[in-house]
Image (cartoon, rainbow, N blue to C red):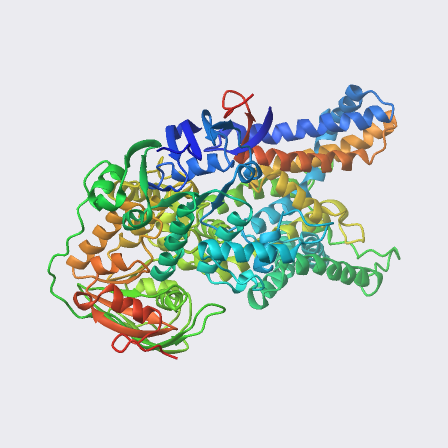
Amino acid sequence: MGFRLEPRASTPAWLNAALSFGAVAAALILCAGLIALSGADVLSAYAIMFDNAFGNVYALTETLVKATPLVFTGLAVAVAFHAKFWNIGAEGQLLAGAMLGCWVGGFANVPGPLAIVLMLIAGAIGGAAVALAPALLRVRLKVDDVVSSLLINSIVYYVMMALIEGPWKDPMSGYPNSPPIQDAANFPILMEGTRLHLGVVLAALAAPLIWVLMRRTTLGFAIHAVGENAEASAYGGIRVNQVLLTAAAISGGLAGLAGVSEVGGIHYQVMSEISTGYGYTGIVIAMLARLNPLGVIPAAVFFAAVMTGAEAMSRATGVPVFLAQVIQATALITMLVALLFNAYRIRRTGGPAGVGAH
Amino acid sequence: MTEPPLLDMRGVTKVFGDVRANDGVDLVVRPGDVLGLLGENGAGKTTLMNVLFGAYQADAGVILIDSKPVRIRNSADALAYGIGMVHQHFHLAPRLSALENLLIGQPGRFGMLDRRRAVARLEEIRRNFGLWVDPKRMVFNLAIGEQQRLEIVKALFRGARLLILDEPTAVLTPAEADGLFAAMRAMSKQGFGIVFITHKLAEARAVATRCVILRHGKVAGAVERPAEASNRDIARLMCGRDIAPPERAPVAVGDAVLELKRVSTRPHGGAALAEVSLTVRGGEIVGVAGVSGNGQRALADVLSGMLAPTGGEIRLAGAPMRRAAPEEAQRLGLGRIPEDRMRTGLVTALTVADNMILPRLKKRPFSRYGWIDTKAIRAFAEERILAFDIRCPGPDARTAMLSGGNLQKILLARELAHDPIVLLAAQPTRGLDIGATRFVHDRFLEMRERGRGILLISEDLEELMALTDRIAVMYDGRIAGEMATSEATVERLGLLMVGANAETGERRT
C-alpha cells in the first residue's frame, strides 16, 4: 500500500480558493506546536492575535495600514512574474519611489490634491526607472534578471543612505532623515483617531485595476503569453521585448507607489527604516496570492494581521514576537505544497488496481 | 510448437478521469516476436507500454512475465523483469560519454566503475546484434540516430529480453531506419521479444512478425502475417473506416507567390542557410526534402521572420519582405505551421481561444483600443473549432491538454482563417495519426486548388511524393537538387539527401 501523485485532468474552481485557505489554516496548525512549546495556551494565543488584528476599529485600520505597502509590492511582483521577468528588486524600486516622491513632495507647494498627484507620478516613475535597468540588461545583454534586480536593491539603498546622511539630512532635527514634505502633500487621514490614509484606498483600488489590466487588455494578454512561451508569442507577432519592458515598468511603478504611500501617508519624510523589507515580502505575498492581483489583498492583509497580532500576543503571553515570521514563512511553504494539489491529486496505489497484488 | 510467452498481459485497464485509456487489453509477446503495436494517437499504445514499464499502475488486469504474475511499480522493477523501453524522448545525460551513460545506476566494483567489463559487454552486443556506439564519444556529439542506438544498447546492456520501442523511426532517416530494422531482426532471431510502436504501416509490415491494433483503448484486431496484409486493411482496423489516398486535382499554375533569391543566414547553433533560391507559384505545393539538420529549420525561420537573413531577397506575393519579423511575414500573406507546435506554434498554457487569435490580438474584432473583446474571441474560436473538428471541451480549454493532432488543427484553423496566399508548413504531420494526417493533407490540397502556394518542408518522403508538384532537396544548407515530383524516386531523393549527386552518385565534399 502506498500513495502516489497523478496529474489532474482538470482543477475544480472551488479547489483554488479552498487551497489558499487550507494553506493558511495548515500554517496556523503547524505553528501551534511552537506556541505550546513556549508555554502559552494555543487557542487563547491565537484569539489574542486575531483580536488585536481585527477585533476593533483601530486594530483593523492598523492592519490595513500595514497591509498597504505589501499590496503594492505584491502587485508589482505579480505583474513581473506573469511576464517571467524575475523582479526581486521591488525593495529598491520602493525606495526609489519614496525618494522621488518625497523630493517632489518637499517643494510641491501647490494645492493638496495636485501635490499628491505629482508625488504619486514621481514615485511611480522612480520605481519604474529602477525596474527598467535589470529589464533592459536582460533584453539587450541577456543578463540574469534575478541577480541584477536583486543587486540593484543595495545600490538604491546606499544611495538613499548617502543622501539622508549627507546633502539631504534634515537640518532641523539633525537625524539621518530627509526634510519633511509640504503639508499639502500629506495624504489625508480618512478616519479620525486612526492612521487610515489615502494610500490604503489607492492600494485597494490598484488591485482590481491590475486585475482588469491583466485580464481584459491586449497588454495583459501579451504579458501572459510572453511569460508562458516567449518564442510562440514572438512567432504570433507579439513584440516580446517591448512587452517585457512594459511589464517591468508597471511592476516598478507599483513598487514605487508603495514607497510614496509610506512617505505621504505615514512618515512624511524619507528615513533609513522607511521599508522593513516590504519589497521582499511582496514576493511572498504574490506567491501566496498565486500571482492573482485580487488575491494579493487577502494575502497582504493576512501578513499584516499576523504582524500586528503577533506583537500583542507576545506582550500578553510571552510568546516571542518572531513567531510572526515563522507563521508567515510556514504559510508560504504550505501554500507551495498546496499548489501541488492544484495540478495533481493523491491516489492510493495497490488497492484493487494491484497487478498481481498480494 | 508454442513456446511459453515472454509477456502475457490480460485485461489491462487504465482509467484517467473519465477516459478509459486502456480497456481490457490482452497482449502476448513470445520469444522471437516483433510485435507491431499500431493505433491512432490517443488509442492507448503509449499508456499500455507505460503500464508495462511501471510508469503507471493498471486499474485492473494482470501482467505475466514467463507465465508468472508480476507487479511492476517502477522502471527498476521493469528492468529487473528484463523489460527495456526506448522512449520517444531519450533519457541520456548529454555531458557524459556513451560508456558513462551505460554505467549510470549500474553497480560498480568496490565503488569504482568497471569500464573494462562494460566495454567487453558492448563488444558482445555489437557481435550479436550489429549495434555499436563508440563508448568514448560524448552523447551531445552523437546524432539522433546514434543516441537512439545508445538507448537500445543501454536496455540490452541491462539485460532486457523484452524491448519496447516507442515510435523509434520518427527521428530516423530511411537508411538509419533500415539499420534499426536489421538489428531488430537479429534480436528476434536470438529469441528476444520486441514491441514496436508505430504509426507507419509500411514499417510495421516490413519488420513486424505480428501486429496488434488498438482503437479507443481496446484491441481492435490483430494481423498475423503483416507482410502479406495490405496497408488499407490495417488502416481500416486503426481508424474503423476506409481511408483512400489523397487525390490531386489538376490545377492551373499561377504567378510566383513566394520567391527566395540567394538567401543566406546563420542562426545561433544549428545549420546555416547558404544562398538558397526557391520559387513557389500559386496552385503549387513545393516540397523541401532532407535529413533533419541540413538547414530546413533556418529556412523556415527566415521565411517566417524569426531569423534575419544575412543576404539575399525574399518576396511574398510579389512584395519584398523588408523586415525580419513574424508580423511582417503575416502582413504579406504568409500562413505558418511551425515544426515545433508546442514550443513555437502555441502557448500551451493559454486557452484554445487565446491561441486561435494570438497573431491577431491587436486586430478587430478581437480587441479595440487595447481592450480585449472576450465575446468576439470566443465566437471566433467556437466557429474554428467546429470548422476544423477540433476535439476539445470548448474554447476555454487549456491547450496543453489536447493531443498532437488537435494542436495541429488549432494551428491550421488559426493560420488558414485569413486565407494566406502562401503557407509555410514545416513537418506538419510529424507525430500525427492517419486520420489527422489525412485532414492536414486535405486542407493543403484545397488551398492548392484555390490557387494558393504551399512550401512543405518534410522528412517524410511518402508525404512529399503524394502531395507535391516539385521537390527540392536540402543538404548542408543548400538546395542540392530540385525535380518535378513526377520524375522523383525515393532512390534519387535519398542520394541527394545524403549529399551525393543525383546523376553520378558521387559524394559531394
- Residue ranking furthest to the front: B1
User: In which quadrant is the C terminus of chain B drawn?
Assistant: bottom left
Q: Is residue B142 above or below residue B159?
A: below
Q: Position of residue B480 (x, y in %)?
A: 31, 74
**Hey, which quadrant is residue B265 in on the image?**
bottom left
Residue B373 visible, this angle: no
Q: Describe residue A125's horizontal placement relative to residue B328 as left or right.
A: right
At x 17% / y 70%, what residue is drawn? B255
Q: Position of residue B59 (x, y in %)?
A: 46, 25
Nearer to us in this view, A107 or B108:
B108
Q: Position of residue A58 (x, y in %)?
A: 74, 30
Residue A337 visible, this angle: yes
Nearer to us in this view, B385 or A310:
B385
**Hey, which quadrant is residue A50 in on the image?**
top right
At x 32% / y 46%, what residue is drawn? B199
Q: Position of residue A20 (x, y in %)?
A: 60, 31
User: In which quadrant is the N terminus of chain B drawn?
Assistant: top left
- The count of marks equals 0
